[in-house]
Image (cartoon, grey):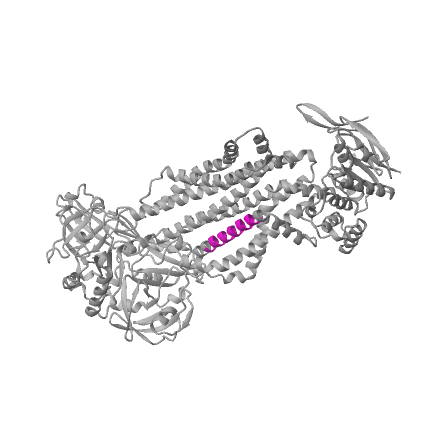
Amino acid sequence: MMLLQLNNLFKWVQSGGQRIFLLKDINLDVEEGEFISIMGPSGSGKSTLLNVIGMLDNFDEGEYHFLGESVHNLKEKYRANLYKEYIGFVFQSYHLLDDLTVKENLEMPLLYKKFKASERKAMVADMLDRFNIVGKKDLFPVQLSGGQQQLVGIARALISNPKLLLADEPTGNLNSQQGEEIMDLFKQLNNEGVTIIQVTHSEKNAAYGSRIINLLDGRMI
Amino acid sequence: MRSNFFRIAFRKFWKQKASTFTKLFSLIVGIVSLFYIGVYIFHETSYDRFHRNYNNIYKLNTAIISPTGNLSLGLSATPLGPYLQTVVPEIKKFVRINKEYGSHALRYQDQLFSETENIYYADPDFFALFNFDFLRGNPDEALIGPNKVVITERMAQKYMGSLDAVNKTINYDDKVFTVTAVLKDLPSNSHLQFDFLVSMDTFMAKSDPNATQNWTWCPMNTYLLINENARPGSLEQSLKNIPAYLEETEAGDRYVASIEPLKGLHFSDPKLGELGTKGKISDLYVLLGIGIMILLLAVSNFINLSTAQFSFQHKEVFVKKTVGATRSAIFSQFFNETVLLSSLATVLALFVILASSGVYGDFLGYNLDLSWMYKPLAILGLILIPMALSLLGGIFPAFKYSKIAEVSGTNIAKRKQYLIDTRSALVAFQFLITSGLIIGALLIYSQMKYLNDKDLGMDIAQRIVLEYGPNSGIGNSFETLKEELGQIPGIETVSFSSHVPGQIPNGVSTGIYGLNGHNSNGEINVNLVDYDFIKDYGLEIIAGRDFRRGEADRTSALILNESAVKAFGFQNPEDILGASFEQWGGDGKVIGVVKDFNYLSLHQKVGLLSLKIWPDQFMKISMRINPLEFENTLEQLASKWTSLYPQIPFNYYFVDDNFRAQYNKDQQFASIINGFTLVSICIGILGLIAYATFWCGRRRKELSIRKVLGATTGLLTWRLYSGFSIPVLSGFVLAIPLAYYLGKQWLQGFAYQVELQWYFFIIPLGILLVFTWLAVGVQTLRVVSSNPVDNLKEE
């Protein structure tokens, strides 16, 4: 089943009276259950594309359909509802909130979805259990290693059961062993049915995926 | 609110300790300052409102239009009140009050007390007009008949040691007074301030019957109670038709009676002979302005610090957005944090107020009544204050943060720039206020110093005044006493008079008939003095001669001051010498002219003054005492006095203290301004330090790059400092015209003003720049001395 579709998508910025294209004529179909790796040199538009798919960033031209909804016609509020419901994010630098404990970081997305307190508690406990971090639930991010932080980051992205997981260089700040563990986790999640799109520099990580998209100067090649 | 909102919010406050402390401190100080300013303003504007007839009471004033200038009296003639009641039906009741000036000896059983300026005579209807609380006795009958006195609670305690004073007797002026009632101590916001209220019949009995029917002698503060629905217009018409005032007096004076409502009396122009102290409404505006400025300072600190945390918090906003937070959710989170902090500040401010109200009350000289703080309305205020503060200080940052949630990463840089500009403007605004206040405080300080230091044209240092009051019979034998006192070693000069500098002498109508045929009349002040007074006070005779010892100059020789000579129309002081005068039914010759001296405060120009010897009216003995033997001399003086006059309390004060007391209200105002200026400087500096921390933090990367490229520490520091000084300087420049204008306005209240000096403006600038330098300097050194590699790795 088709998860999302990008048709003739353009994104640009104005600089000195000229258009500088960040994304140029992107056409992309993603089926549910795929594991896609986006590759390309620095500045080729990988992260921009990921942000557009994640609806964090706007685009200037073209169409974006997500689960049959036309994202390009949606108002901000509906768009927010859409990604809140279906999309989870994982970042290179984890982006955990320093003031919150592991448990509170996990709980945060649920707060914006009006779950009851008891439900939230159950879901957080479930996620802590699943990722084997029950013992760390009251620690703050700074008290964790990079790998553990990224584990929490992924757990947070998954807590509301997204269909699509977007990961921007998820292993970029990790050593090779930690990185491998994270990629194995991704593979396992994918096998459980989560669609994953990751941005990566590493051929080795890209190999975990089912398909590779190469970008150069905002164009798919 | 979310279940864990409080926990996380407090965790955040704790983590940003410095910023939280600054915010809390500024807000607390802001609230406390505004509260105290509010209390002061409230007290000043609440004068006399506690009388149930507040809106229907009017006071009679009399203006005397005289060829030598006009006098505006808060007083009226004795028969005027009764007359008006017979011709104007709208007047329900009237009360006349006569105040006893100077010190008086009172005796209860065998104890002797001295009372100063707290004895009033009043008509029986006093308590029908004015509402004072009775502890003992009946208000309707308290002042009927002669030799009746109503006293206050504290006097009952002082004299009888208990409140059961009714029917006990006090001796005063060789008469026996019966206490008819005891009043609760008078509220501080009453313009009538007395401890003894004596029945008017007593006054009438001791006065000359002709005097009490005299229309040109104005000893009374007369108050009228007017029908609720009456229009003051008809009353004013009647005031114009008072038969006795239709024509000029023989001396060429014209009397004009007018009314003034009790409402607003406290702030109206001061008039001679008025009761109570006056307030200045412009002072209240200045204070209110300062209060608002302090609060704005606190709030702008708040905004500044909140938005300065942008760099740390935009990550939080971004992450929350990716997990689905809407803009309104982010707005309410930041706003709620502000509400929480302001509520905390309000509660802490309350504790500060409760702990410090006593000190503030002592400073103002009255008890602060804070009981209203426990009433529902005040509690509502407690809820509203944090809300209002949050609205002021919280909306803007919360709005800005929520706005980030809408924009994508590429626009964040632009937003940041916008926030920085806003902050610079806020810093400039803070410095506008702070420099304005510093300039103002300096100006007030200089003016007060100028008033204290200015050459008054007389010498009042090291002099004490012994006041024995009228009716003592000392006056006529003053020479004997003078000699006796002069024998005490340490007493250098002794002179007698009716008034000493700092006290308003009597105004009397005086006629001058010049040798060259130039005649003139007018109302001038007269101080009755002995022949040593001019010499002893260091006054300078510029024409003619001083008084001579002996009978010849008694009551028949007059010395005028320069201003009086001019007012009577004589060009040179010499021209008036030898002129005849008529004053108070007496006559004689003008023998000399004394150089103008400031016998009253420098708020006013030197008034017209005449000096005459009239021993009967002497009430005060001025003595210059050798400062080296002061204690000793005073002891001897006291024992001599008690042996000579056991019935008159030994009661003395310093002439210069008494003179300076005229500036008490100014001094208090200056202290209030200085106090709050200090507060605002503290808040300003705190904000500056916090802002400097942020400013330098943001430039870490830039500085590191410059350092890697070879910039020296000095260059880097200068770069930071010069950039930072721009908002400080622009705030300062904007403050100059504002402070100049307001300062000039304030100085208008003084007849003698200090010149505005350039350094009034340069000193504040120096202070500000030094503090800026310290605040920025510390931060700069921290950044500059750190390893650039650490800073560059960060991003």
Of B500 and B509, the residue lying toward us: B500
| Image location of residue A200, percent across then percent down | 78, 34
Q: Is residue B122 above or below residue A94?
A: below
* B664 relative to B229 in the view: left or right: left
Q: Where the C terminus of chain B falls, by quadrant?
A: top right
Of B354 and B570, the residue lying toward us: B354
Is residue B400 visible in this depiction of the protein?
yes
Is residue B604 visible in this depiction of the protein?
no
Q: Residue furthest front?
A: A177
In the image, residue B628 lies in the stretch drawn in magenta: no
Over which residues does the magenta segment extend?
A: B20-39
Total label count?
0
Residue drawn at x 55%, y 46% as measured from the top left? B299
* B710 relative to B406 in the view: left or right: left
| Image location of residue B223, percent across then percent down | 36, 60
| Image location of residue A98, percent across then percent down | 67, 46
Q: Is residue B749 above or below residue B416?
A: below
| Image location of residue B26, percent across then percent down | 53, 49
